[in-house]
Amino acid sequence: MTDWLPPLLSINDFDGEWRRYFDAVYQAFQADFCGTRPDFMGKRMGLKRQPLLQDKESTYWHFITDGKVEDERQCDFDRCARIRWPRAMIERCPAGRPAEEDVVLWWKTVRNNEDRYVLALPDFSYIVILADRGEFVLPWTAYTVKEQHRRARLDREYEAYWEGIK
């Protein structure tokens, strides 16, 4: 059940006007990660600012765009619509091993030779990635997982992590 998540921010709410929508998405990001920042498991939350693009932080672009090559990333309306979800998930993430009633699952993994936390909805349909920098974490990216095989792989990764913690 995802009724606890903030409502989607749709371009239709802005009569399809891209500039107004883009500004609203950025304002939501600023409110959640620039003004105040949540803590995560006792660690402070930083923010990857550089490289700035259009005077906007790198983390922002990773939250709203998709693609492997930095300067070729494309805007993703699913990501934009869910711009308020990463903070909500961070705030609802349990500090210890997730229980059956928790609305956010988490585990640690290594991606691109870096320690990362993965936060996921229980059906693995949406994830938030945080980079672990020791004394602090950086919100790295967040996205919808549409393919069932990718959700199954995330589920296996989650199960394997907690199996190894026993």
Image (tube, grey):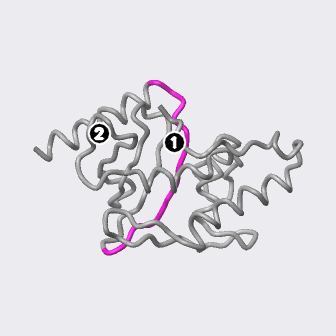
Q: Main secondary structure of the magenta part?
A: strand
- Does the magenta-highlighted stretch encompass residue 136? yes
Q: Is 145 displayed left or right of 15 in the figure? A: left
What's the distance in space between the residues labelled 2 and 1, CA to CA?
A: 22 Å
* 10 Å crowding of disc 1: few (<14), some (14-19), many (20+): few
Q: Nearer the viewer, residue 56 or 37?
A: 37
Residue at point 51% right, 27% down?
147
Q: Nearer the viewer, mark 2 or mark 1?
A: 1
Q: Find disc 1 in the rendering and name its residue.
A: 4
How far from the left and from the top, in percent, is residue 18? 85, 50
**Label 2's element?**
helix
The stretch of residues the image draws in magenta is: 135-148
Say if 106 sits above or below 122 in the image: below
Q: Nearer the viewer, residue 135 or 150?
A: 135
Q: Find disc 2 in the rendering and name its residue.
A: 158
Residue at point 62% right, 61% down?
60
Count of numbered circles on the image: 2
Q: Is 108 displayed left or right of 14 in the figure? A: left
How far from the left and from the top, in percent, is residue 8? 66, 42
Say if 25 sits above or below 135 in the image: above
Residue at point 51% right, 56% down?
87
Q: Quadrant of the C terminus?
A: top left
Badge 2 vs badge 1, beta-carbon distance below 8 Å: no
**Mark 2 or mark 1: which comes first in sequence?**
1
How far from the left and from the top, in percent, is residue 89? 46, 50
**Label 1's element?**
loop
Amino acid type shown at disc 2: Tyr
Amino acid type shown at disc 1: Trp
- Quarter-wise, where is residue 16 in the image? top right
How far from the left and from the top, in percent, is residue 128? 47, 50
